[in-house]
Amino acid sequence: MQSEGFEAYAATVSPTGSVWDRACELYAHLTGTRPDYGAAHAAKAGHTRFGALVRPRLGADWPASPIHLLGHSFGGATVRLFAELCEHGSAEERAATPPGELSPLFSGALKGKIRSITTLAAPHNGTTAMHPEANCFGVNVLEFILYSAAVLDAKIEKLEDFWHYQLEHFGIEKGLTFRETLERISAYDKSSDSAKHDLSVEGASAVNRSITCLPEVYYFSYACDATKELDLPTADRIKEKITGTRAVRFVSGLPGQIAAFWKATGDTQATPPADAPTETNPTGANEVPVQKKSHSLRYPMPNITLSIAETCARMAAFARPEECTPDGIPLDERWQPNDGLVNTISAKAPFTEPQKDFDPAHIEKGIWQVMPVCSGWDHTDIVGGNRVGGVKEIHAFYRGIAERLCTMDSE
C-alpha cells in the first residue's frame, strides 16, 4: 500500500496470544513501548505484567490523529478489542493500578482515536476448525502449526526476527531446555488466556461480550468461501470418508481427490470464479445461499491452498444443529461454507452486534457493513495467497479498500 501512495504499517503481535494480550501488544507496537498486559489481567492469567519485546514505533502521528485498522483472521478480534480499550479503557485495570503506573490504553483517554475497522476472514464468532471433529488424526491443524513454531521460536536464535511468538510473560523464552520448553507450552495450551481459547466458538462468545460496536466507528467485514455444495448422493459418500473409519486413507489422498472430483463434475477451474474481487469489481461475489438441506455437504474448491484443504473438507462436513453457540445460534448447515480455517458465517460480523449488507450510497457508523462474500477465495488468498490474479489483483483489492477509507476521511 505504501507503493500505492498510502501511509500504511503492519503491526506484529503474538500469533498464539489471547485477544487481550494481542490488543496490548498492538498498542505497544503503535507507541514503541514495552507491552503492558495490565496488573489485574496478569494476576488473573498467571503471567507477568510486562512483555519483553520493545518494537520501533509505527508511524509518528498516533494517537494525535485517528487511524483506520485492518485485521486479518484473528487480527479482527484483536483490532476490535483494541478499539474498545481505546474508547472505554478498563475499569478493572484502573481499580488495580495506581494512576501513575496505569497504561494509557486502560485509562479511557484514547476516545475517538480509531476511525474505522475492516476485518478480513475474521472468526468473529469463533471457528469450527477448533472443534475436535475438525481435527486431523486427533491433532488440530491450527494448534499443531502454531505450537510447533512456538517451540522453534524458543529454541532457534534469530527466528524472532521473522516471527516472534512473544510468550516471555508466560516464561516461554530462550535458554530453557527442550523439555522445559515443551512443559511450559503444554501448560500455556491449557490456559484460557490464549488464541486456542478465544478462537473457539465458546471463547469467541466470551470475547464478544467484552466488546461493543462503537457509535463513532465505521465497520466493514469481508468473508471468504472456498467450498461448493455437493449433490446429496455424493455428499453421503464423502461424509462417510471424512467421518468414518476410512478417514486416514481419505485424508492422505485428499489433494488428488479434490482435483479428480471437480474434473469428474466438469469444474476444473484453478482460479477464483469471475465474480471474485477484481479491479472492476473490488467487492466480489454475492453471498452464497444459506443451505436448507438436512444432509447437505460442501467440498473444497479445486484451487484451495493444499495445507488447509483437509480442514476445509472437515469444516464443510460439520453440522450439529442440536448444538448451539453460547449466543443461541445453532451449529447447523450455515456453518459449512468456509475458507479453510474460518466459517463464512462467522466472518461476516459478531452475532451480538448490528449489521447490514454493504451499501456504498449509505455508509453508516456504529454498524457492520458486510461486504459480498469473496467466493472462491480461501483464508490465504485474501492476504495475497498464491492464485487470486497475482500481485496486480490483490493490489487492486486493497487499493479499493484504501480509497474508500480515504474518501471517508475527506468527508
Image (cartoon, rainbow, N blue to C red):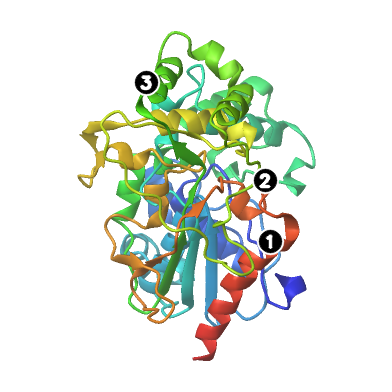
Q: Type of residue at label 1?
A: Glu
Label 3, on which residue? 236
Out of 267 and 23, give the one closest to the viewer: 267
| Element under disc 3 | helix
Q: Residue at x 23, y 33 (%)?
A: 321
Image quadrant for the N terminus? bottom right
343 relative position to 151: left or right: left
Q: Which residue lies furthest to the bottom in this view?
A: 411
Q: Give the label, 2 or 3, closer to the camera.
A: 3
Q: How far apart are marks 1 and 2 (CA)?
A: 30 Å
Label 2, on which residue? 164
Disc on the earlier residue, 1 or 2: 2
Q: Quadrant of residue 171?
A: top right
Disc on the earlier residue, 3 or 1: 3
- Residue 393 - label: 1
Out of 344 and 388, give the one closest to the viewer: 388
| Element under disc 2 | loop
**From where the camera sits, is residue 77 visible?**
yes
- Disc 3 to disc 1: CB gap under 8 Å: no
Q: Distance between the residues labelled 2 and 3?
A: 43 Å
Q: Type of residue at label 3?
A: Asp
Q: In which quarter of the image is residue 87?
A: bottom left
| Element under disc 1 | helix
